[in-house]
Image: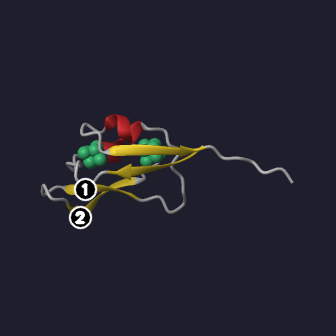
């Protein structure tokens, strides 16, 4: 299962709970500062490792993370 997440930067408080919750360490606190003055979380997944497990979204107290999942379809030759 492939996944990806979208972080709503304006809702993020930079608490870091999502950072510690991701088993694959795909989320980091960035240098970007949102309108409320918080350093926001950033999803970095160049190798497309995210499984869409939803742990990060469940941990976020501000419901700032949306998770998208994509079923991998095997093509028959
Ligand atoms: S959905 Fe799971 S694997 Fe993907 S970023 Fe969130 S915690 Fe990490
Ligand atoms: S858990 Fe939510 S509020 Fe906290 S850093 Fe992650 S996205 Fe931002």
Q: Is residue 49 left or right of residue 75?
A: left
Q: Residue at x 47, y 58 (%)?
A: 45
Q: Locate residue 55: give its quadrant.
A: top left
Q: Residue at x 26, y 54 (%)?
A: 9
Spot occupied by residue 64 in the image (x, y as percentages of width and height): 29, 44
Q: Residue at x 39, y 44 (%)?
A: 66
Q: Quadrant of ligand 1?
A: top left
Q: Is residue 44 left or right of residue 11?
A: right
Query: Which mark, residue 32?
Result: 2
Query: Which mark, residue 40?
Result: 1
Spot occupied by residue 19 in the image (x, y as percentages of width and height): 33, 48
Task: Tell me how many marks there are.
Answer: 2
Spot occupied by residue 52 in the image (x, y as percentages of width and height): 50, 43
| The CB of the residue at mark 2 lies under 8 Å from ligand 2 | no
Q: Is residue 32 left or right of residue 6?
A: left
Spot occupied by residue 24 in the image (x, y as percentages of width and height): 47, 48
Residue 54 makes an appearance in the image: yes
Q: Nearer the viewer, residue 43 or 71?
A: 71
Instruction: Name the secondary structure under disc 2.
Output: strand
| The CB of the residue at mark 1 lies under 8 Å from ligand 2 | yes
**CB contact under 8 Å: marks 2 and 1:** yes
């Amino acid at each position: 299962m492939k996944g990806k997440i979208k972080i709503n930067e304006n809702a993020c408080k930079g608490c870091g709970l999502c950072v510690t919750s991701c088993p694959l360490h795909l989320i980091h606190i960035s240098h970007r500062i949102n309108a409320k003055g918080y350093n926001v979380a950033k999803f970095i997944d160049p190798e497309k490792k995210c499984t869409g497990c939803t742990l990060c979204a469940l941990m976020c107290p501000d419901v700032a993370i949306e998770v998208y999942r994509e079923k991998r379809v095997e093509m028959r030759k």
